[in-house]
Image (spheres, rainbow, N blue to C red):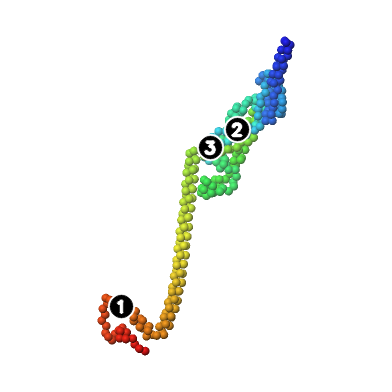
Amino acid sequence: MKLKGVWIILLIAAAVMVYDSAFTVSETEQVVITQFGRIVGDAIKDPGLKFKLPFIQKAHIFNKNILEWDGEPGQIPTLDKTFIWVDAFARWRIVDPVKFFQTVNNRLNAMSRLNDIIDPAVRNFITSHKLIDAVRKSNRELDTAEVGLEDLEKKPQSHYVITIGREKITQGILEQAQPKVDPFGIELVDVKIKGINYVEEVRKSVYDRMIAERKQIAEKFRSEGKGEAQRVLGQKDKELQQITSEAYRIAQELKGKADAEATQIYAAAYGLDPEFYSFLQTLEVYNDSLDKSSSVLLSTDSEIMKYFKGFPSK
């Protein structure tokens, strides 16, 4: 029984030793082995099952893939004295885990060192160049209809000429920061500016200017619209007068022709019996001039009384 117990203890001890000595390395990991705090051998970068001395050696695992650094937005003045908020980010990776372990030891310390290196590089390049260089990357023609750019016509075009551009600024930040992170076994893959904005005081004045410019443009459109409306109304009145005049002229011509034809018909009709025409005209005079309240003194020789004496015979 005692021998059996010893074998069980030995098996358990062997299992514990194997468990502590074996470890796996994935495709995204790399390992540094230390013994009593000192690095043993080279870094392990190949994936697979690996072994170390149990209990006296320790495996320190570090990422092999690309990691992210996201800086805190900060207020930075540009070369043309415009204060802006700049938000930058970077991508980095551990290329030498031995150096990394010896200098910064872990990701938390590495992030602190990156803050101390990348933030000043960003500030240095932003303050060394104009705002237009931090915003744009080429000298393509600006669309003056874009919000906030209506004042381009008021300023010389040289004010907006790009001397370096945003891409070269970020490339310069990368080139300035990389030598400083090399001693930590770190490679900067990329540095980019995520966002640029005016500070609150400047932003308010910019928005006020944009609003004023938009109101000015709107007022211009309204004035042009009113002018166009007056032009259309004037054209309409002119055309209406022309149509009315033409219609009146045509009506008068038709009326004149009708009166002429009526006169011809009357003349032809009355020409058949002039004495009867004179009789009808005299009756119309009687009807228009004599009524119940009329009193007329006429001589019996008066021409108008001739039909009271009798209708003349032919």
Q: Amino acid at mark 1?
A: Ser
Label 2 – label 3 distance at C-alpha: 18 Å
Q: Amino acid at mark 2?
A: Trp
Residue ID at (52%, 39%): 198
Q: Quadrant of the N terminus?
A: top right
Q: Of callouts 3 and 1, which one flags the residue occurring earlier in the amino acid sequence?
A: 3
Residue ID at (43%, 83%): 268
Q: Are marks 2 and 1 in contact (CB under 8 Å)?
A: no
Dot label at residue 85: 3
Label 2 – label 1 distance at C-alpha: 117 Å
Residue 178 pos. (x, y %): 63, 33
Residue of label 1: 289
217 left or right of 290 in image = right
Label 3 – label 1 distance at C-alpha: 104 Å
Decide if residue 99 is in sight here. Answer: no
Residue 132 pos. (x, y %): 56, 42
Decide if residue 217 is in sight here. Answer: yes
Which residue lies most toward the bottom here? 314
Q: Amino acid at mark 3?
A: Trp
In the picture, residue 290 is in which quadrant?
bottom left
Residue ID at (48%, 41%): 204
Dot label at residue 38: none
Residue 56, compared with residue 275, is above or below; it is above
Q: Quadrant of the C terminus?
A: bottom left
Residue of label 2: 69
Nearest the camera: 140 or 280? 280
191 left or right of 239 in image = right
Q: How would you rate the neighbour count of disc 1 (Cα within 10 Å): few for under 14, some for 14-19, many for 20 or more? A: few
Q: Of callouts 2 and 3, which one flags the residue occurring earlier in the amino acid sequence?
A: 2
